[in-house]
Amino acid sequence: MASSETESKPHLKTVDVSNTEIAFAHKSNKELRRMSYLFRLMNKGWIVSTGSSLGLWLHSKGINIFNPMLKATIFKQFCGGTSLQDCQAAIDYLHVNKTLSVLDYGAEGKSTEEDFDRTMEENIKAITFASTHPSVPIISSKITSLASEELLRKFQSEGKLSGQESQEFEKVRNRLNQLCHAAKRNNMAVFIDAEETWIQDTIDTLVKDLMEKYNREKVVVYHTYQLYRKDKLSSLIADHQEAVTKGYKLGAKLVRGAYMEKERDRAKTMGYPSPIQDTKEDTDRDYNIAIKYCVDHYEQIASCNGSHNQKSVEYEAELIAERGLQRNHSHLNFCQLYGMSDFITFNLAEGGYNVAKYVPYGPVKEVVPYLIRRAKENTSVTGEMSRELSFILSEMKRRGMK
């Protein structure tokens, strides 16, 4: 993923991601106050819960009356812009702060062939756009923006498609191949997001085929492993072994996961064991084992530590130092979401690591589901101050702000 040259000598010390002066050096007092106000609101569970339910209902009905308010607040915090060109300011701002960008067109839950083709074209436009920006080495895509969720589910659950469905599935393969071919031609890479368990096996099959085809010389395609699932650590290891056997490099983006409540609710309703780890400690354990596995096999695995967890980020930094590896090796990468965890991102960047921000973009009406997930992630369910807010307030106090 890295766009810079590998250093001739490794650094041996780790990074202090708690330095708020570095984390918010690029923010004015006015911007810090705006952020503190927004995160204070998101810290109130009842506001987020009520607003999320209403927002999703309005979105499903195509009612966009609150979009101007969203654009001025939560959209501004978590998205790069409404179009590729609109993202230029965010890309430049990150580049000045030694941080790469991952472009992510915010389309989700599409249902027609026309929508799927339009999203593919938008992703290819993003690749062409990014190829002219050295600080944008990668884009991200969701397969459910390129294929029917029902088709993916049926392929997984039944293994047999009708003649018409088989033709549609071949169109899905073709879209993905066009996307990855464009990435390889432009010296770019693609993150393929993980999704729900009832379609993830299909996604696994599609992405492994793409990696086998495109990851021969270097990693073009990255698979995503959700370590809150009980089976994904073993999947990572098995996929690496398969890649070695077949002669290609594995691209592995590590995340904790994004659909926990939905997964547990469905398992309970349908009467099967939950695929989600029983405790947060189980997830943390598997996540850190996965980090170690990727670092230990960094020559064959290009990994991205897509975590907002301070301990997991510091753990990988320690492993890199212990093994005497270059901090900016192209197979050792970090990534956080735009508008979140600046204390991690910019301290890593200042320390010389490959780190990027995930920069979603698109019309406000397209990214409403994404924005609601971000609001929920920043909500305190215990009544305690959220991590994001605590760092913002620490920096305001350091500056003597009231």
Image (tube, rainbow, N blue to C red):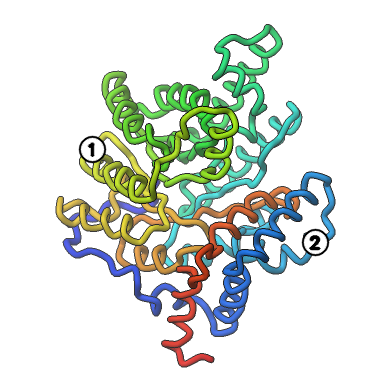
Q: Is residue 372 visible?
A: yes
Give, as a three-letter code, the residue at label 2: Phe
Q: Is residue 265 above or below residue 97?
A: above
Residue 66 marker? 2
Left or right of 297? Residue 72 is right
In front: label 2 or label 1: 2
Q: Residue at x 57, y 39 (%)?
A: 265
Q: Quadrant of residue 343?
A: bottom left
In the current view of this chain or complex, which residue is farthest to the top?
A: 163
Nearer to me, 139 or 234? 234
Q: CA distance from mark 2 to mark 1?
A: 48 Å
Q: Quadrant of residue 90?
A: bottom right
Q: In the picture shown, does residue 89 fall above or below 232?
A: below
User: SS for tag 2?
Assistant: loop
Query: Percent position (x, y) of residue 344?
Result: 39, 64
Q: Which mark is residue 297?
A: 1
Frontmost residue, 49 versus 4: 49
Q: Residues within 10 Å of mark 2 (few under 14, many from 20)?
A: few
Q: Measured from the top left, where is residue 381 in percent x and y?
A: 53, 62
